[in-house]
Image (cartoon, rainbow, N blue to C red):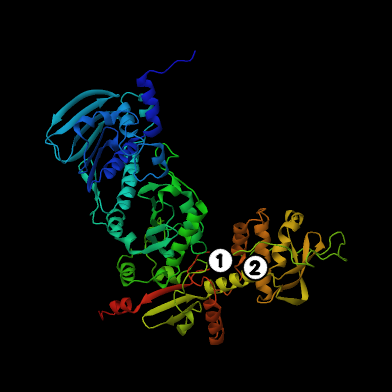
Amino acid sequence: MIKILEKSVADKIAAGEVIDRPVSIIKELLENSIDAAATAITVEIRNGGKSYIRVTDNGCGIPADEAELAFMRHATSKITSERDLDAIRTLGFRGEALASICAVARVELVTKTYDSKAGRKVVVEGSSTIENTAVGCPEGTTVTVRDLFYNVPARHKFLASDSAETRRIVDMVSRIALSYGDVKITLINGSKVVFSTKGKGRILDSIISIYGSDTGRDLLPVEGSAGGFVLKGFVSSPAASLASRSRQVFCVNGRVISSKVMERALDEAYREKLFHGRFPAAFLFLAIPPEKLDVNIHPTKKEIRFDDSFEVEDFVKRSVRDVITQKEALPQIRSEDIRRKQYDTAPEKPPQVKEKIPFASDSEQVDIKNILTTLRRERDTETEIAPEPDEPETDKSSTTDTVLPVMRIELDRPSQNPFDINGLKVIGTVFDTYILASDSDTFYLIDQHAAHERIFFEKLLNQYNTGEKNSQQLLVPLNLGVPADVTATEDEWMGQLVNMGYYLEFFGNNTYRIREIPAFMDMSEAEGFLRDFFTEAEGRPDFTDERAVSRIITRSCKSAVKGGDILDRREIDALMKDLAACINPFSCPHGRPTFVRMTRYEIEKMFKRV
């Protein structure tokens, strides 16, 4: 039998769409305060917000005769017609926040408008009004929420521990505080002030207040505008990456959101600049015409939908990419980092004591130790070469007579040249690994292995894209054994190798005979590349996907000049010239930096000259 639910039951069910834990309540109340043009907001919690939440603001307040009406479902002052949904300019608009909160908690509202002589106090429990009286109070609104889910024990038991709920609240309030630098936001947990922003409109000040000065000093300012889009904010230099996305904050038209579109844009901007599993810090604030997005697709408005996600992704990617390819984004050696290493080094432990080595902090700056002890990820994968058959088998014909069609793999070229590598003065090398160079005010260390990997990668990619088979014929062909599943999928990968400049033919017994290799490779480089390429091909990647092919080429570009290889001056000059011709000369294809820098000022500080 179908029947209409009682109002109390329906209200609790509806509240579950908006209010699932304390952080949801604080988000809704914070957004209401910001919509009320508040310039100062204080958030207080106890027990992770489960027993007590209070949000106080100095906004416009609610007229006394409308205070109780604000608790009714779908009561709002922010939209009036269906057309308003096409261009929403406020954070809240559905009129569900207070109605949902009071359905599952005890709520007290105290509010006063600028022109009222007295304020209004409304107390609601379980959607029922308990009190509605006049009260003396300052301008603005204070909402106090007690005993969340007191009348819905099934939901209360699914709440996490006090500390876990507190962490969620701190993270959310931090993100909103960053998005509204002109609003002074204070968060108090129990009797302790967690943080308090200055409210002076400076985003960097808010970032430092919340995340500390170590994070702030590694950030680069981002500014971009095109086609009605405006992007502002900060991103970390590639050298200051993190192990998670915890410090990625995205704000669109003042709304803090989760956005796969903006995450992808960041990943693409930092492609080839970070190791797999590392992420940049990013605090990005995007302004977009409100008619170009839909904010009404998620019950708690955590997600939005762009009309043209590809346009937004490309705009954000290019804006960030232009910043991180500048000279200022190169890893920098600072004098304080060196001193910290000198004076903070713990004494060595006796050999018999097993000491757990702590991981470096995510925000730790690049220092001399990190620069001069590069992790070498070279694997000499020895594949047993199958014995040559007496005669080549004839059931497979060569597939390298023509260049097979493949897609182009484009690298993002910076909109402006960051600095002239050809203008650097090469001084020499150190440890047979690092090239020393300088310009008028900066000293550079260039990792010759990372630099050669970048040159190797871009030359190979250029040959792949153009289809010009600049090959050299081998006097003695090279035989290379491969796994059977690689042989079986020859038609998927052969075109990729042909367009790189290889000429190879099946020779039977899962063996290929290589007769030509790319002109810029020597034998060992060509063989090493093929071994790594076939290893990647075992995973059956999608060779029709540009990104998949690019990753395979990237991972296979390991056969370059190694650290420890002695280069003469002519080879160094040639390496620097080739590096200057690269589209992205500042990192190897795997994400390691090719350059680190130290300013003249930092050097003079170390020698006490300033």
Horizontal relation, residue 430 to residue 23: left or right: right
The numbered dot on residue 411 is 1
Q: Quadrant of the C terminus?
A: bottom left
Q: Quadrant of residue 582?
A: bottom right
Horizontal relation, residue 388 to residue 273: left or right: right
Q: Which residue is mark 2?
A: 465
Give the distance between the C-alpha atoms of the residues marked 1 and 2, in whole angstroms: 11 Å
Horizontal relation, residue 42 to residue 593: left or right: left
Query: Residue 418 location, x and y as percent?
Result: 44, 74
Query: Is residue 528 visible to the viewer in this orientation of the structure?
Result: no
345 or 7: which is nearer to us? Answer: 7
Q: Tag 2's secondary structure? A: helix
Q: Earlier in the sequence, mark 1 or mark 2?
A: 1
Horizontal relation, residue 323 to residue 462: left or right: left
Q: Are marks 1 and 2 in contact (CB under 8 Å)?
A: no
* Image: 463 above or below 263: below
576 or 72: which is nearer to us? Answer: 72
Residue type at mark 2?
Asn
Query: Residue 401 location, x and y as percent?
Result: 80, 68
Q: Quadrant of residue 410?
A: bottom right
Q: Residues within 10 Å of mark 1 (few under 14, many from 20)?
A: some
